[in-house]
Every structure is written in structure tokens, then in C-alpha cells.
Amino acid sequence: MSSQPNPIAENEPLLVGDHPALDFLNTVARIDGVLVDSLKSDRDVARWLDASGWAVEADLAAIKAGSLLEAAQELRDTIRALVERRKAEKRVDLDTLNAYLAESRSYLKLTREKDGTLRLRRKWKQRNPEEMLAPLAESAAGLLANGDFSLVRKCENGDCVLWFYDRTKSHQRRWCSMAMCGNRHKVAAYRKRQQQSA
């Protein structure tokens, strides 16, 4: 049993991927050897979107129960397959992601900040689950088209399934997070050295 707090077990979004599409893949993580999905309800999906900066403003009660979760899981599976194939330099099938992109209905809105400055924001229509997920689909498409896939990596911990975009200056990031897998690796290496010297 791990003594570290577990964000997924606590149902908090795990945002270690340095890209929203990769953070979305990371909603499935291995905890104590078992794959755990932190998205278990429409509300979990809405909470994740909100934490990522895309607040669901639509009334979840107005959509069929479970439909946002179902659409999110389908989109996540699609993004995972596309990222894995793109990383392996294999041909990708874009039809499913393009179907989500076709549902995107957005507009620009000019707003005034508290200090009086003007800010341009993109707003998405949210009449159905696919529209609620549109910003995420757009983010994934941006990653696939413009991302440097030499910097898109899986955590080097063989038991970990988390992805990240290495934005470090040296581009030597190895772990999903130092607090999780990086420290575990350091502790394991230290114990191994101690056993060898004993």
C-alpha cells in the first residue's frame, strides 16, 4: 500500500501530462497494480473538463444520464489509439476524431477583465455530449497535427501507463511525475544499492 496521496483514488483530476489530450488519457492510471478509471459518471467528466479550463455550463440533467461519460470514454479511446499510433510512426485513422471535430460549434467572445483590459475568449456550444467534448477534441487534433512526438512520452516506470509532453528545457523528463514514479524509482534504486553494499 502506497503512503503517497493518490489523486485518482481521491477522484481529483491528475494533470501531469503537460497537454490536455495527454491529461485526458491519464484519467486511466495503474494504482496498486490495477487499472483505475477516474471517470465514472457524467459529473466526473464535467469536473475533469472544468479542471482543464473548459467548464461545462450546460445542465447535465438535460442530457441522457451516462451519455457524457460514454462519449468521453469513446473519445479517450480514440485519442489513445491515435497517440500510440502517431508515436509509433504508424498511419492513423482520423474518422472518429473528425466526427467529434465536426460537432464543434464555437464562437469568440470579447470580455472585460476586472482591471479593464479586454480579453478574447472562445466559447463552445454545449447542447450535447459531443459539443461538450469539442474543446478536448480540438486540443487532441492540435497535438496530433502540430505536436513534436519525440517529446510525447510514456512514463519510464514499466508499471505506469501515464503519458506526458516533455516541455523541460533539456527534454530529459523520464517520469509522469517525480512525486509519483520518479521518487519510487529513486527509493528502489537506493534500496538496491544498500542491499548490494551489505
Image (cartoon, helix red, strand yellow):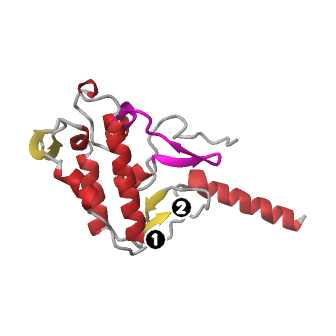
Does 171 appear in magenta?
no
Task: Determine the residue positioned at 52% across, 57% down.
Answer: 176
* Residue at numbered disc 1: 171
State left or right for residue 21 relative to residue 57. Answer: right
Q: Which of the two marks, 2 or 1, is nearer to us in this view?
A: 2
Question: In the image shown, does 126 or 65 lie closer to the viewer?
Answer: 65
Q: Are marks 2 and 1 in contact (CB under 8 Å)?
A: no
State left or right for residue 193 relative to residue 106. Answer: right
Q: Quadrant of residue 50?
A: top left
Circle 2 — which element? loop
Circle 1 — which element? loop
Task: Determine the residue positioned at 16% across, 46% down.
Answer: 122
Which residues fall within the magenta stretch?
A: 27-46
Q: Quadrant of residue 5?
A: top right
Of label 2 and label 1, which has the lower sequence position? Answer: 2
* Residue at numbered disc 2: 155
When the figure is inspected, residue 41 is found, relative to residue 54, above or below; the finding is: above
Task: Tell me the quadrant of the picture where the N terminus can be found.
Answer: top right
Mark 2 vs mark 1, CA separation in Å:
13 Å
| Residue 114 location (% of width, % of height) | 17, 35
Does 44 appear in magenta?
yes
Q: Amino acid at mark 1?
A: His
Task: Determine the residue positioned at 45% across, 71% down.
Answer: 171
The local crowd at label 1, few if under 14, some if 14 to 19, many if 20 or more residues have their Cα within 10 Å, is few
The local crowd at label 2, few if under 14, some if 14 to 19, many if 20 or more residues have their Cα within 10 Å, is many
State left or right for residue 98 relative to residue 187. Answer: left
Q: Residue furthest right?
A: 198
| Residue 191 location (% of width, % of height) | 78, 59
When the figure is inspected, residue 175 is found, relative to residue 124, above or below; the finding is: below
